């Protein structure tokens, strides 16, 4: 049975951050905990959010790590409870938003966070008691502001997914102005994350035509505008289009993702210093080649339709076009340039086989097929 659900209230415009207090009132948040990270604070973006909350008693947790951890969630929950907070505002990229989703669980549910992880059967345990969340993305990548999932490194060092419709932010405030001036390297890495979401969800075999349409349009926008956004941080149209591509990728990936994310999640657990979006960019060419043989991909001409959205002559051009794009964006040439070696393959493959995205790839990979994809990406 296909389950199709759309999704949450979205405020999308330049200057939308000014609507924060209005949205708190609508959602019923009177004492928010703002969850962010040191970079967002240093860039002055946190202050823009705080300026929009004049008159509300606000607490701040600004120590979200680059890859959110269960330890960071615990530290933030202490602030949430000490300050008597009744809701959350995440201001940042996917890390801050995912950390806030972890807080939404841990502040209102008993037991260790792992108890609520998807692969531990935890999704049904996440109830409507989850703290309400408003998400304000400051990058164009994960789309976590409109997604039901979060990725968190738990205490045993696994990078696990947490999924529940009770985690979908009550409001997504998408303000492209907050991404103006984002450094080129981060623009490129997060932008390729968004493109990976659009491509992987479009290749998924699940039946969800609305998601397919949203993903294909998001790919068209993202592919056309990632270079202008990376070259010129002040390009307002490119920033708007990339924020839309990011949002659309996450609206669509309720279909499920696949082997790109199985590998990225696993490798990100092995080495948490590696950027998730960059890893997705590295794995995309090999996974597209692998998926080309999937029956559902061939029947629906999915690679041909992606190639058209990307302005390419044919499906066979996609892997090399991605590699060329990565090079033009200044991303690494492969995993080896990121410090990954063959000695890590066994651990990466073990994690990928257990990841929640493994079974939603249109072609289920064996350990040896994952090894081949890793070798191609090295």
Image (cartoon, rainbow, N blue to C red):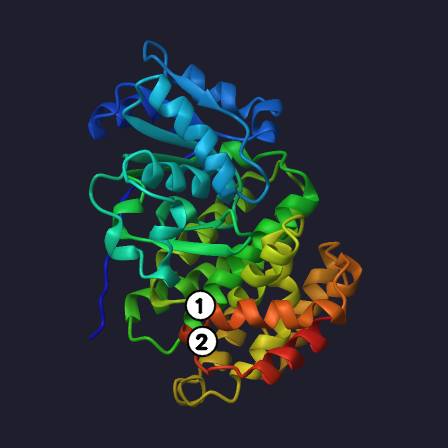
Does residue 299 sit above or below 273 in this rendering?
below
Q: Position of residue 321 (x, y in %)?
A: 66, 71
C-alpha separation, residue under disc 2 versus residue under disc 1: 7 Å
Label 2, on which residue? Answer: 361
Left/right placement of residue 5 relative to residue 51 reads: left
Does residue 168 sit above or below 2 in this rendering?
above
Q: Do the residues under discs 2 and 1 have CB atoms within 8 angstroms?
A: yes
Task: Determine the residue positioned at 62% across, 61% down.
Answer: 267
Quick one: label 1, few (<14), some, or many (20+) residues within 10 Å? some
Residue 114 shows in the view: yes
Number of labels in the image equals: 2
Q: Position of residue 31 (x, y in %)?
A: 30, 19
Task: Determine the residue positioned at 56% across, 52% down.
Answer: 157
Task: Determine the residue positioned at 53% across, 52% down.
Answer: 156
Q: Which mark, by number, is residue 357?
A: 1
Residues 60 and 201: in front is 60
Q: Position of residue 165 (x, y in %)?
A: 26, 51
Does residue 354 sit above or below 84 in this rendering?
below
Which quadrant is home to the N terminus? bottom left
Q: Quadrant of residue 254?
A: bottom left
Which quadrant is home to the C terminus? bottom right
Quick one: label 2, few (<14), some, or many (20+) residues within 10 Å? many
Task: Determine the residue positioned at 29% across, 75% down.
Answer: 207
Residues 16 and 161: in front is 161
């Amino acid at each position: 049975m296909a389950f199709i659900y759309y999704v949450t209230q979205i405020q999308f415009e330049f200057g939308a951050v000014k609507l924060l207090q209005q949205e708190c009132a609508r959602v019923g948040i009177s004492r928010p905990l703002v969850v962010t990270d040191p970079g967002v604070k240093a860039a002055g973006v946190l202050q823009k959010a705080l300026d929009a909350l004049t008159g509300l008693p606000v607490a701040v947790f600004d120590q979200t790590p680059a890859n959110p951890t269960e330890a960071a969630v615990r530290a933030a929950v202490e602030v949430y409870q000490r300050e008597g907070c009744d809701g959350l505002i995440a201001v940042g990229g996917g890390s801050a938003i995912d950390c806030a989703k972890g807080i939404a669980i841990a502040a209102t549910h008993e037991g260790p966070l792992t108890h609520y992880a998807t692969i531990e059967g935890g999704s049904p345990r996440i109830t409507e008691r989850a703290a309400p969340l408003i998400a304000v993305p400051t990058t164009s990548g994960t789309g976590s502001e409109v997604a039901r999932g979060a990725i968190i490194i738990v205490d045993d060092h696994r990078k696990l997914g947490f999924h529940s419709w009770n985690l979908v932010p009550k409001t997504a405030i998408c303000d492209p102005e907050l991404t103006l001036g984002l450094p080129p390297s981060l623009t490129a890495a997060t932008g390729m994350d968004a493109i990976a979401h659009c491509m992987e969800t479009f290749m998924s075999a699940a039946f969800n035509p609305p998601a397919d349409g949203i993903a294909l349009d998001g790919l068209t926008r993202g592919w056309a505008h990632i270079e202008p956004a990376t070259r010129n941080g002040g390009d307002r149209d490119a920033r708007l289009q990339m924020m839309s591509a990011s949002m659309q990728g996450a609206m669509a990936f309720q279909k499920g993702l696949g082997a790109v994310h199985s590998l990225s999640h696993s490798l990100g657990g092995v080495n948490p210093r590696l950027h998730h979006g960059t890893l997705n960019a590295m794995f995309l060419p090999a996974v597209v080649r692998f998926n080309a043989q999937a029956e559902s991909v061939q029947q629906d001409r999915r690679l041909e339709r992606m190639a058209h959205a990307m302005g390419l002559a044919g499906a066979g051009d996609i892997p090399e076009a991605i590699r060329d794009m990565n090079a033009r964006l200044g991303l690494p040439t492969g995993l080896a340039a990121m410090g990954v070696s063959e000695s890590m393959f066994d651990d990466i493959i073990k994690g990928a086989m257990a990841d929640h995205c493994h079974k939603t790839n249109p072609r289920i990979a064996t350990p040896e097929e994952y090894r081949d994809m890793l070798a191609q990406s090295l």
